[in-house]
Image: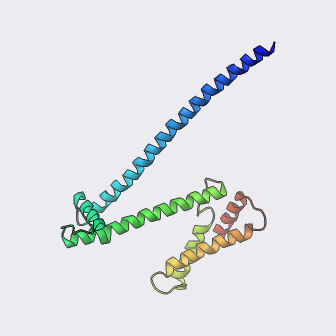
Amino acid sequence: MNHGDIMTGSAVVMKKLSSNGNAIVGEYHSSLAVKQAVLWLLILSIFLFICLGTTVGVFDIPASHILQAIFCQLSGRPSGLPELTENIILNIRLPRIILGLTAGCGLGMAGTVMQGILRNQMASPYTLGISSGASFGATLAIVLNFSLVPGTWGIVVNAFAGSLLCAIIILGINMGRHATPVFMILTGIALMFLF
């Protein structure tokens, strides 16, 4: 085998690698295009479901009235709709739908962060004991009538304080030990049974 044979052999290998590389890049771009199309479809479906969710209720409102009320509210022009219809759309139904969408996005992001930090797809507020701490705080407010905040928000604040206490206990136990994610989950499961 001489030097020329080695050069032609390496040229053949390089040619195969470049053709495979082009195929991989092409496959990546096609999968990226599919992901972008799905993302735009989901964004469009969110707006469609917001519009459909606003039409449904005790007082049926056509989708054209909803779009008219929203666009006129954004542009500052009068909508020409009856005041009752405009109040139902802008002051009752849309705020509830937007609040539900915001809460769902927040819960989804929190779950994603929790699973990413712990590197475990089974990580959830239940396996970490955080939901048990929240139910313990709410139980204190309901059964023992002990609340951190008087009034109607007492149960919610106690539930939040219970979940926060449980999270602080988990972090405190795992802080100085260079703990693994598995140890954090096991600590959370133990706290779940404690609360």
Residue 98, percent across and down? 39, 65
Outermost residue toward the front in this view: 4
On the question of residue 180 being in view, the answer is: yes
Nearer to me, 27 or 57: 27
Residue 136, percent across and down? 58, 75
Picture residue at 66% right of the left edge, 57% below the top: 118
Picture residue at 30% right of the left edge, 69% below the top: 90
Q: Is residue 181 left or right of residue 25?
A: right
Looking at the rendered image, the quarter that the N terminus falls into is top right
Q: Is residue 79 above or below residue 142?
A: above
Nearer to me, 182 or 38: 38
Picture residue at 30% right of the left edge, 66% below the top: 74
Picture residue at 81% right of the left edge, 13% below the top: 2
Q: Is residue 110 above or below residue 144?
A: above
On the question of residue 195 being in view, the answer is: no
Nearer to me, 40 or 193: 40
Q: Is residue 49 left or right of residue 174?
A: left
Looking at the rendered image, the quarter that the C terminus falls into is bottom right
Residue 49, percent across and down? 34, 56
Q: Is residue 80 left or right of residue 164?
A: left
